[in-house]
Amino acid sequence: MISAQAWTDAERLWDFQQMGHELRPCSVAIGLGSHDLGVADTTADFYHRGMMPLIVFTGATSPTTRDRMPRGEAEHYRERAIELGVPADAILVEPQARNTGENIRFSRALLEQHRVAVSSVLLISKPYEERRAYATARKMWSEVEWVSASTPMSLADYVASIGDAHLVIDMLTGAQQRLMLYPKQGFMIEQHIPEEVAAAFERLSNAGFTSRLVRR
């Protein structure tokens, strides 16, 4: 059972992750691989709305996706997007990345290999990782403009889609911790963390939402 305080704190972290960028056409989209096929669905929707001419899906597998996506996250995303009407020749697959930094570095290398001119990137992630993805991308590839986006939905709707509130709040707490730790390690640009967001993170950590935390 999730307490009222924990739910309020989780919503605060959820809202902080939303970058609020205005959706606009970009040179390319990069869809970050994960357990969530909703990223592929949203990327396909943006393609049909004319937001980009080319998509890179990036991601290998992880312990949480190995059984559900045995051919790799990026390949399953590609298959899903094609089911949704995206032409196969509008998709590049990067199948090796195992973290967000590698997602960006390997996608950049793939685009350079294909001689794709890139001035702006529509970066599509899970809703609870918009800001984390953006901060990483800005650090790893600072020469382009980044527009961060995800499936527009509430925390309650996302929890309903996953079916496990505790797991979702664990993931939110882990994403928030990385926003605070990784800039010091050179993995992200620095982000201003409002006091109320930091306090929400501390309460959730102390309440036991710790399965996705980096051990220090």
Image (spheres, helix red, strand yellow):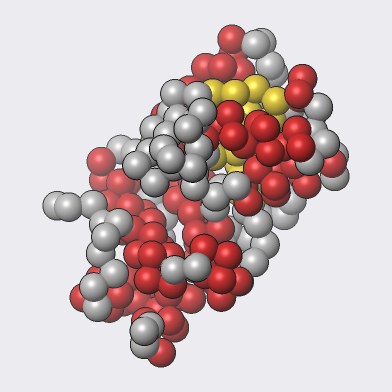
**x and y, in percent, of residue 100 in the image:** 43, 38
**Does residue 27 lie above or below 179 as drawn?**
above
Q: Say whether residue 64 is left or right of residue 138.
A: left
Question: Residue drawn 17% across and 52% down?
Answer: 215
146 shown above or below 205: above
Where residue 5 appears, as percent x and y from the top left, is 37, 87
Residue 108 place in picture, x, y as percent: 54, 22
Instruction: Give the quadrant of the N terminus.
Output: bottom left
Q: Is residue 139 visible?
A: no
Left or right for 86, reference 139: right
Q: Residue at x 58, y 29 (%)?
A: 75
Residue at 70% x, 47% y: name it.
Answer: 41
How many labels sit on residues?
A: 0
Give above or below for 182 relative to 194: above
Q: In the figure, is residue 196 to the left or right of 37?
A: left
> On the image, which quarter does residue 51 sit in?
top right
On the image, which quarter does residue 110 sit in?
A: top right
**Residue nearest the observer in this picture, 127 or 89:** 89
At x 65% / y 56%, what residue is drawn?
151
Q: Tell which residue pokes out farthest to the left in this image.
A: 216
Between 14 and 145, the one lying in front of the other is 14
Left or right: residue 49 versus residue 141 is right
The quadrant in which residue 89 appears is top right
